[in-house]
Amino acid sequence: MKPEDRELVAQLCAARSGQKVDPAKDYLLETRLGPVARREGFDSIGDLMAGLRARREDRLIWAIVEAMAAGDTSFFRDRAAFDYFRDVLAPELAHRRKDQPIRIWSAACGTGQEIHSLAMLVDDMAGQWPEARFELFGSDLSERALEKAQTGLYTQFEVQRGLPIRSLVRHFEKVDEMWAISPQIRQAIRWRRLNLIGDMSRVRGFDLVFCRNVIGSMIEPAQRQVVENLAAALNPGGKVLFGSGEDPVAGAEPLVPVDDAPGLYALRSADRAAA
């Protein structure tokens, strides 16, 4: 790729989704954009970029931005977070919400492994709180990732990454060369395409948000926007779980860390009162 093409991709990603893309990483850009070029009918990435400059089609821009946003994911990634959900957060929510629905959102869910992992845990715990009603939501910037997530179909390689054998046996069945998650788990989740730095004024009422390994790959203004959007989406008493080592709070953002719970943040007292 030409240097000016790499710079253009970085600029588009920053403007459209807040992604921080290093133009010097030509191998990464070519790996991500090669399939886009083929899918869109171009002979090369160079032709793809020439077509982009000539047409400036919104659809083509988003195809490039979404391809660059693709991240690594796996079932029960960073297992400690899921153990904490099972042992601490889920019981707390079941007790506090009582007969109200418990709304959990996996922001930037990618191809669905995170929200499906949460759904499996919720299903496994169903007998502990018979009256608790969990509502699960998954969102992502990428339409292609969401399409895969909604099918609930995963390769042998994908289910081998982090999925305990007991969960595979309980919640999946073999379909040809793929593994299909059970209809009960798949149908428990609602899906939506969302840009976390876009207009999220209608995204409200969540008790727990998983937004892990996302903001670290964003430019600073986008990080702040995401934190503000997620905070605004919380119910009073709601919390956001960020990835291990991610520190989203710098200055006057509306979230504060929860003691002894790495990555977990809650609304500041003033924001809780206003809510």
Image (cartoon, helix red, strand yellow):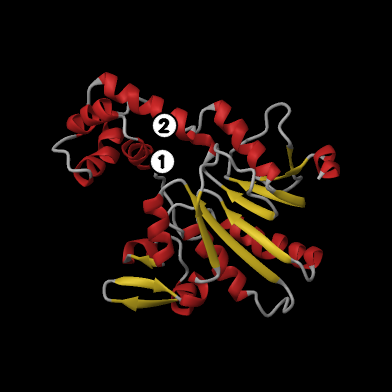
Q: Secondary structure at mark 1?
A: helix
Q: Residue at x 50, y 48 (%)?
A: 108
Q: Residue at x 57, y 63 (%)?
A: 118
Which quarter of the figure has residue 159? bottom left
Indicate the amino acid at tag 2: Cys
Q: For residue 13, which numbered disc appears in the image?
A: 2
Q: For this view, does 218 lie left or right of residue 92? A: left
Residue 132 position (above or below residue 229): below
Residue of label 1: 69
Q: For this view, does 144 lie left or right of residue 55? A: right
Indicate the amino acid at tag 1: Ala
Quadrant where the N terminus is found in the figure = top left
Q: Residue at x 32, y 34 (%)?
A: 57
Q: For this view, does 245 lie left or right of residue 9? A: right
Residue 22 position (above or below residue 177): above
Q: How many marks?
A: 2
Bin the neighbour count of mark 2 within 10 Å (Cα to Cα): few under 14, some 14-19, many 20 and up.
Answer: many
Q: Residue at x 46, y 28 (%)?
A: 15
